[in-house]
Structure formats: structure tokens, C-alpha cells
Image: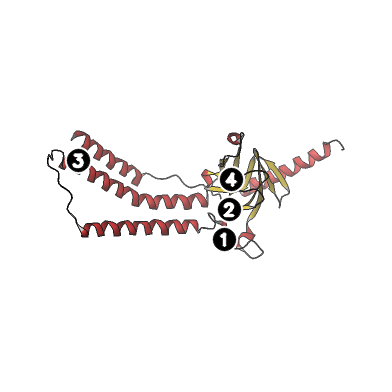
Amino acid sequence: MRHSRRFAWLCLFAAGVCLFATPAAAQSVNRAAIDDLNEQLLYVALPLTLFVELTLVYAIYRFRNNDRPRPTIDDPALEITWTAATGAILVFVGVSAFFVLSNPYISPAAAGPTEPGGELDDDMEIEVLAYQWGWEFHYPDANVTTQTRLVIPRDTDVRFSLRSTDVIHSFYVPQLGIKQDIFPAQTAVARTNATQNGTYRLYCAELCGSGHSRMHGSVVVLNQSAYDDWVADQRDNATTAARVAPPA
């Protein structure tokens, strides 16, 4: 009995923490959409979990000394009720997930065509090249190329064109809610709009060989003026390197 009460109070405490804890602000539009979905599902899953656990605790206590158990009596109304409730929950989960999956930041294809006039046509484009075992980033508009370190401006729609030179890789930035597999001989697309300055870890989330564990990098989000200064510095460094390089 004592353990049952402790377990029940533990469940109620966990519920209170989950319901009243203030979640951290999302770092991108992608992450916000994913967090909102998780929060919606939590409001469904948590009451169900508490109901099941409390029912279990009650059953253990109520029938703890039942020396002559009998089979459960059929109750068609109850069976119809829990079947309908389960169906309603599954519909809610499916509809909620559908709206997130149709978000153009989660599924770039939902944003429309990339040709002039399409929504993606206004995005800043960065070409990402994955290889065993590293990353290369090319900024066509700025004519800048970097290795391992990706820099993007805050509050700007960014489209990543992803290619692989060898095997399957996966472009994964968990704090920004970006994850996209990259297949050889194909160009994949990922999209984001970062809303907070910071440095975020970039991983390859697909086992790609013996160097997979060291295939990581960083994504730096800067405000627009700082990003423009960074681009100017990259151009100056490239010009200086070209001047001092010995002739071939």
C-alpha cells in the first residue's frame, strides 16, 4: 500500500512538472514547429499515462487479497468506448503530424517550385557538399567557400542544396530542427530560418564509414550586419591568399 501511494504521488508530481515547466525558446522556425507538435502530443499522452497508471495502482490495491478471481464480464459499451477513444486520439495525432510535415521548413517541397516566382526562389542558397568525412559549404551569392563551419544570417530563409561525393550522409542540426539524408548522385533540399544567434552542432546522422564519428561541424547564426562583415572578411582573406600564392 505504501509503495502504491508513493508511485501515485510520483506520477502526479511528474505530471505537474511537465504541465507547468516553461520550455526553452526554439532556435529556429523548424525547431518551433517540432516543439509545438511535441507539446500537443504531450497534452494527450500525459493524461492517458496517468489514467492507466492510476488504474493499475487501484486494481493492485482493490484486488490484492482476491483469492477467487473470476473472468472479466463482457461489457460491449465499454469496449466500444475505448475503441472510439483510441480512434479519436489516433486521428488527432495524425492531423497534428500532417500539419507539421506539410510545413515548408520541414518539407521544402511544400514551399512550391524553385523557379523564379516560387517561394523558394527568395531564399538565400547555400550549397552543401558531404564527403568522407567532412563538410564543404559554398555561398554562390557571395562566392565564398568554407569547410566544417557554416555561417548563416538570423531571421533569413535559407535553402541548403545537399550533395554527396561518395556514400549516404545525413545533414543533422538538432537544435535547429534540421535533418535531411543525402544520397549520391542526387541533390536533396533542406530549409530553415534561424531565430536566435548562437553556435550549434552539425552532425552526420548516417553511418558512413570508419570516420563517421568525426564527421561533424558547427552552424553559426549571426545577425545580418555581423554576417555581412563575416562575408567581407572571407572575401578579403581569399583575395590575400590568392595574391601571396606562388605561381603554378
Q: Is residue 170 visible?
A: yes
Question: In this image, 221 relative to 38: left or right?
Answer: right
Which is in the foreground here, disc 2 or disc 4? 4
Q: Earlier in the sequence, mark 4 or mark 3?
A: 3
Which is in the foreground here, disc 4 or disc 3? 3
- Above or below, comparing residue 142 to residue 65 in the picture: below
Q: CA distance from mark 2 to mark 4?
A: 11 Å
Q: Horizontal and vertical percent for residue 55?
A: 23, 46
Q: For mark 2, does the 10 Å Cα neighbourhood hold few (<14), some (14 to 19), or many (20 or more) residues?
A: many
Q: What secondary structure is found at the residue carrying circle 4?
A: strand
Callout 2 amino acid: Arg
Q: What secondary structure is found at the residue carrying circle 3?
A: helix
- Residue at the right extreme? 247
Q: Earlier in the sequence, mark 1 or mark 3?
A: 3
Give the residue number, with chain letter if any, for mark 4.
171
Callout 1 amino acid: Ala
Q: For mark 3, does the 10 Å Cα neighbourhood hold few (<14), some (14 to 19), or many (20 or more) residues?
A: few
Q: CA distance from mark 1 to mark 3?
A: 53 Å
Callout 3 amino acid: Ile
Give the numbered dot on residue 184. none
Q: Earlier in the sequence, mark 4 or mark 1?
A: 1
Give the residue number, with chain letter if any, for mark 3.
60
